[in-house]
Every structure is written in C-alpha cells, then in structure tokens.
Amino acid sequence: MLLKSQSVGDIPWKEKSFTPTTGQITFIIPNIPIDLIALNFYVNGVQCEPVTQFIVSGSTITWLNTPFSLGTSDWVQIKYK
C-alpha cells in the first residue's frame, strides 16, 4: 500500500532469482508487486515481455513456455517494486 507521500519511483526495487526445475513455469515472489509496470522478468539475462511470455497474478509469476521450456541450466530473475 502506498502512502500519500510516496510514489512508485520512491520505493526500492526488490529482486528474486531462481534456478528452475525442469519444466517449472510458476515462480512465487515474497511480496505482491505494487505496480505491474514496475515488474521485470528475465530468463538467462534477457528481459521477457508481459502477457506474451509471462503473466502475473498476485505474487505468482507464470512463464508461458515461450519460446522454450525452462530447465536446470536456466536462470530466472524477477525485479519488482
């Protein structure tokens, strides 16, 4: 919840990294993002596109298997406010 004196820009970025299991598609972050525009999802250092490559529901981010399935050699990073 934002205080009246805060804006999204004032809130520090949070970061969570994962080494997925083979075929893993859901990732749970500790907090619900306050602004979905300020959520970045990366696979192996490449930023993914919302709606076409991942979707967000609360604190759960779902990878849409685009363009490939994740495996144990991949790295997922989520940055959000």
Image: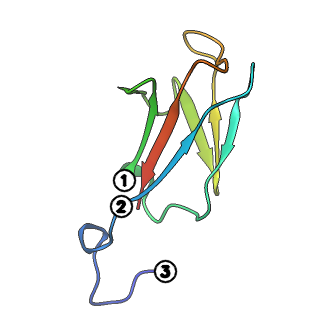
Work out which residue is located at the far top of the displayed protein and give it: 67
Task: Tell me whether the residue at label 3 lies in contact with that at label 2, contact meaning CB atoms closer than 8 angstroms.
Answer: no
- The residue furthest bottom is 4
Residue at the spot 48% in from the left edge and 39% down from the top edge: 77
Task: Name the residue type under label 1.
Answer: Ala
x, y percentage for residue 14? Answer: 43, 60
The quadrant of the rendering that contains the C terminus is bottom left
Tag 1 residue = 38
Lower position in the chain sequence, tag 3 or tag 1:
3
- Which residue is pictured at 42% across the width and 49% down the height? 79
Q: Residues within 10 Å of mark 1 (few under 14, many from 20)?
A: few
**Mark 2–mark 1 CB contact (< 8 Å):** yes
Residue carrying label 2: 13
> In front: 22, or 63?
22
The residue to which callout 3 is attached is 1
The part of the image, by quadrant, that contains residue 49 is: top left
Q: Is residue 38 left or right of residue 59?
A: left
Q: Secondary structure at mark 1?
A: helix
- Of badges 3 and 2, the one in the foreground is 2
